[in-house]
Amino acid sequence: MNFKQNIRGNVALGVNPLGRKQQVLNHINYIKNKSSYEGPKKVLIIGASSSYGLATRISLAFGAGADTIGISYEKGPKSKRNLGTAGWYNNIAFKEAAEKEGLTAKNFVQDAFSHEIKQEVIEYIKNEFGGKVDLVVYSLASGRRTDPNTGQTYTSSIKAIGDSVVGPNINMQKEDYYTETLEPATEQEIADTVKVMGGEDWELWMEALKEADVLSDGVLTTNYSYLGSELNHPYYGNGTLGRAKADCDIKADAINGLLADINGKAQIVVATAVTTKASSVIPFFPVYCVGLYKVMTEKGTHETPIMHMDRIYRDMIYGENAEYDKEGRLRPDSWELDSDTQAQTKVLIEELNEENFNTDKTAYDLFYKEFSNLSGFMVDNYEDQDVTIEELKALDY
């Protein structure tokens, strides 16, 4: 079967299942080539099939020896023209590798926002997963959410708040550098974005798990955030996305109160800028990334999701190098926000235009490769193999 990369704008439509398997194995080997570390042993990851969630799962399983439950909403193959989603194959590749190591790797491929999946996971923890979990990771990224209490569906909007924002962006399909205008959101769009991408579902999960008594004493729950710098505040931190992230801070305080009697903790982790399916479509963000990555690569501080998540858990949360801000948030993004890194990035971005944005002046090639990797293309160590649609359909998650 011939796998072809297909991009529309900055959205990947095609997938190479074998390439995704190889990338998962690459990430596993990255962890296995490092020493093991002491960490949690029973982990629930909500949003486990790609990017931060998948990287977290790989680090904890192959670095700390954790049994894991992963929840995601992915689609399997239907035909040669509809091979499903990359996350579908990520789940399968992870499960296969983890089970070879004697680890439990349970995949729930369902709507994580529903009450039904919460109860199914709780029953699995009680009956087949040792009864309790000691880490709950919330890493769910979705543009839509149906409120399980009302049945109403909400859609998020990536927009500014207050005034329009005008700036440069990159179209990877056309390899085009252009000016984009981001219009301000309405109050309803702001509220809907918070409803989808804020901390409400995280809190619902923790309430359900606590009520069911499947959280261990001293349980930790983490939620990934992003704050960025003054270079992207107009469209991120001060936009609808920033408002949703602020809601997660509020919900963290509520969850801390909920977990107080079992010595639990809710931890917001402010992550660094990395290439994900979501970050690729944020207006202006690709321009920031090709500038930032160039500077950080030269400094030796650029990270992919697997590198970043492993550092967070190995060195910070379960290590001795944790950095917190005054609000108590974990700040592994300090490398990105280093003053010299930001100053150099600012100068570089200001020099970009349609003639040089994709030259060796920037990290455009690196950004494009990392973006392609998400769908199983341009993967290191990949060797083409013959596979049929029937064999892909027979894969079991």
Image (tube, rainbow, N blue to C red):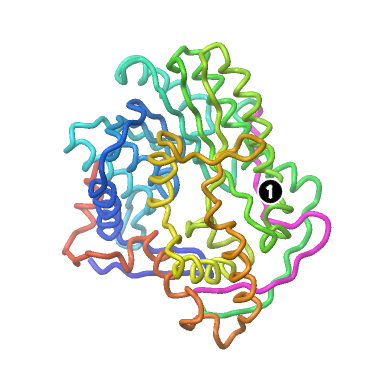
Q: Residue at x 52, y 71 (%)?
A: 290
Q: Nearer the viewer, residue 369 or 8?
A: 369
Query: Dot 1: what SS?
Result: helix
x, y percent for residue 298: 45, 70
Closer to us: 384 or 203: 203
User: What amino acid is labelled 1 in the image?
Assistant: Gly
Query: At 59% across and 67% down in the image, what residue appears?
Result: 288
Q: Is residue 161 magenta?
A: yes
Q: Is residue 359 above or below residue 384?
A: below
Q: Residue furthest right?
A: 162
Figure check: 143 above or below 377: above
In the image, residue 292 above or below residue 197: below
Image quadrant of residue 95? top left
Left or right of 329 on screen, residue 298: left
On the image, the x and y values in percent for residue 45 come to 42, 34
Q: Which residue: 60% across, 38% down? A: 329
**Number of disc labels:** 1
| Extreme-bottom residue of the structure | 355
> Which residue is at a point 70% across and 57% down the rendered structure image?
233
User: Which region shows up in magenta?
Assistant: 150-173
Residue for badge 1 = 242
Q: Is residue 302 magenta?
A: no
Q: Position of residue 201 (x, y in %)?
A: 58, 31
In the picture, measured across the screen, residue 206 lies left or right of residue 45, that is: right
Residue 252, quarter of picture: top right
Q: Relative to 329, is 167 above or below?
A: below
In the rendered image, residue 176, in percent from the top left (x then y), is placed at 56, 80
Q: Quadrant of the C terminus?
A: top left
The N terminus is located in which quarter? bottom left
Give left or right: position of 229 versus 307.
Answer: right
Using a 10 Å C-alpha cutoff, classify the residue at mark 1 as few (fewer than 14 neighbours), some (14 to 19) or many (20 or more). many
